Image (tube, rainbow, N blue to C red):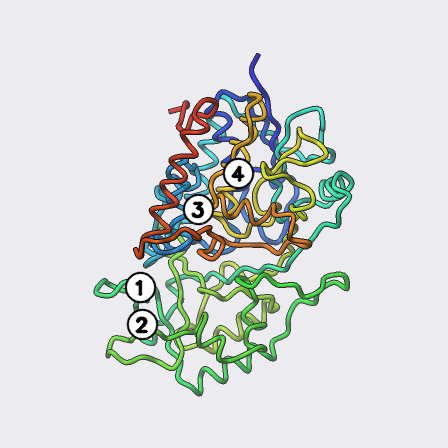
């Protein structure tokens, strides 16, 4: 009899989990509600929608994000396949056409013989069925309440925000230039808006005094460090802006001169018609966003196609609720995956979906649930979010600091990359008796 699994949520984690399980002969019922219930963040009905940035971050082997993407490659990640098929210029980053990316994944999921996409809201969890909850940071209120009843824990959250997107043809290219911070000797791949000190100070004042969308009384200002609104950073420190999203480092203009500050725009689609503001997540009211951005050189006549929006990201207290296998301690039929577990970021969420699916396959086949070594990024992330020593979990992106490198003796700049690949290959060998890493549906 064919094994069967329910997955709630068809975002990055849910689609990764569904794909791996289906490729291993499991019948997957994939539930998704976005076509029925709209919110301010999601804009299309496609699965695995990228709602914030359009980049999966650095491709460098020296960078944590590059290391994690290599691990995902070894594990046959659907998300990574989609990204590479829809890659657009992005300097050192793996930038994608967000619409083509989501369509690629949607078609793969809808056309898989072992996956049934069910477009309906899940109100209650069926504990008699093996279930993966991958409902993400935008979990619906009714499902969220059901999760709270199951966990007995408070549901945590932090505030996240997205950046505006504008049309390329509304930019005055006589006032901007092309450059790439990490690609010396190559043509610039980012549109750079130069600011002198006077322009920078005026812009910061505008940000500090901008009218923002008011938070509800119960929404304390809890921001994830990597996604602070630009106006919040401006209120904190000009120095942070100059060392962060407005840094001019390695962004000399066409005359070889480095401006006081630089705002970067990154290509957002394959046909090169849309650009997003790098590091410009915001909660400023929409009319104010347009007015302030029009004060920037070259953007006097800008056309905004998507305004920046703040939203609340929910996550559970995984150290209390889950074991190392991302399995609910009190109900072994229920697993969690993705950003709702406390990982933060596209690739972190997607890789979590892969790992949860592997754990579910172990459970279905009555095998021991194994974990990748903490010398791998996937293993280190999973250890971090399930570590019972964390009394109150804080969301975590992949970073070199969480890797187990206690036995490091080789002084190689690629040590972490090489170790991680070795550990993931060893992990694949351990699980090979019950997990096929590959595609049965091609």
Q: Who is closer to the viewer here, 274 or 17?
A: 17
Q: Residue at x 54, y 44 (%)?
A: 382
The alpha-carbon separation of the residues under discs 3 and 1 comes to 27 Å
Pointer 1 residue: 182
Which of marks 4 and 2 precedes in the sequence? 2
Locate the C terminus by quadrant: top left
Mark linked to residue 353: 4
The alpha-carbon separation of the residues under discs 2 and 1 comes to 8 Å
* Position above or below: 386 against 116: below
**Disc 3 element:** loop
Mark linked to residue 250: 2
**Disc 4 element:** helix
Which of marks 1 and 3 precedes in the sequence? 1
- Position in image of residue 84 (x %, y %): 35, 43
Drawn side of residue 438 relative to residue 117, left or right: left
> How many other residues sit within 10 Å of disc 1, few (<14), some (14-19) or many (≥20)?
some
């Amino acid at each position: 009899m064919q094994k069967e699994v329910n997955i709630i949520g068809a975002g990055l984690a849910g689609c990764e989990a569904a794909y791996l399980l289906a490729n291993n002969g499991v019948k997957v019922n994939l539930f998704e509600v976005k076509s029925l219930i709209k919110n301010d963040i999601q804009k299309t009905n496609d699965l695995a929608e990228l709602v914030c940035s359009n980049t999966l971050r650095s491709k460098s082997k020296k960078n944590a994000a590059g290391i994690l993407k290599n691990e995902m490659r070894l594990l046959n990640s659907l998300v990574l396949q989609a990204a590479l098929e829809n890659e657009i210029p992005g300097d050192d980053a793996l930038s994608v056409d967000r619409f083509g990316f989501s369509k690629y994944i949607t078609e793969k999921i809808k056309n898989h013989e072992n996956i049934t996409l069910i477009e309906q809201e899940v109100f209650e969890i069926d504990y008699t069925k093996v279930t993966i909850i991958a409902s993400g940071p935008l979990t619906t209120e009714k499902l969220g309440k059901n999760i709270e009843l199951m966990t007995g824990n408070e549901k945590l959250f932090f505030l996240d925000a997205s950046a505006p997107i504008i049309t390329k043809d509304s930019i005055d290219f006589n006032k901007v230039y092309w450059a790439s911070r990490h690609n010396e000797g190559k043509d610039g791949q980012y549109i750079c808006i130069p600011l002198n000190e006077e322009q920078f100070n005026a812009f910061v004042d505008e940000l500090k005094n901008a009218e923002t969308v008011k938070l509800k009384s119960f929404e304390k200002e809890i921001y994830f460090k990597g996604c602070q609104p630009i106006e919040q950073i401006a209120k904190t420190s000009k120095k942070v802006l100059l060392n962060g999203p407005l840094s001019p480092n390695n962004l000399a203009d066409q005359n070889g001169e480095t401006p006081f500050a630089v705002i970067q725009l990154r290509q957002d689609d394959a046909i090169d018609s849309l650009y997003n503001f790098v590091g410009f997540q915001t909660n400023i009211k929409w009319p104010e966003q347009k007015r302030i951005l029009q004060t920037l050189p070259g953007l006097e006549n800008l056309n905004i196609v998507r305004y920046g929006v703040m939203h609340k990201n929910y996550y559970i207290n995984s150290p209390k609720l889950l074991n190392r296998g991302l399995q609910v301690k009190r109900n072994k039929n229920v697993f969690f995956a993705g950003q709702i577990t406390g990982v933060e970021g596209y690739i972190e969420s997607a890789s979590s979906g892969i790992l949860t699916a592997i754990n579910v396959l172990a459970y279905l086949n009555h095998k021991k649930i194994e974990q990748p070594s903490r010398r791998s990024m996937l293993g280190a992330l999973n250890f971090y979010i399930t570590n019972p020593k964390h009394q109150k979990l804080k969301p975590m992106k992949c970073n070199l600091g969480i890797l187990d490198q206690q036995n490091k003796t080789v002084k190689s700049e690629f040590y972490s990359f090489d170790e991680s690949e070795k550990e993931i290959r060893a992990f694949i060998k351990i699980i090979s008796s019950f997990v096929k890493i590959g595609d049965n549906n091609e």
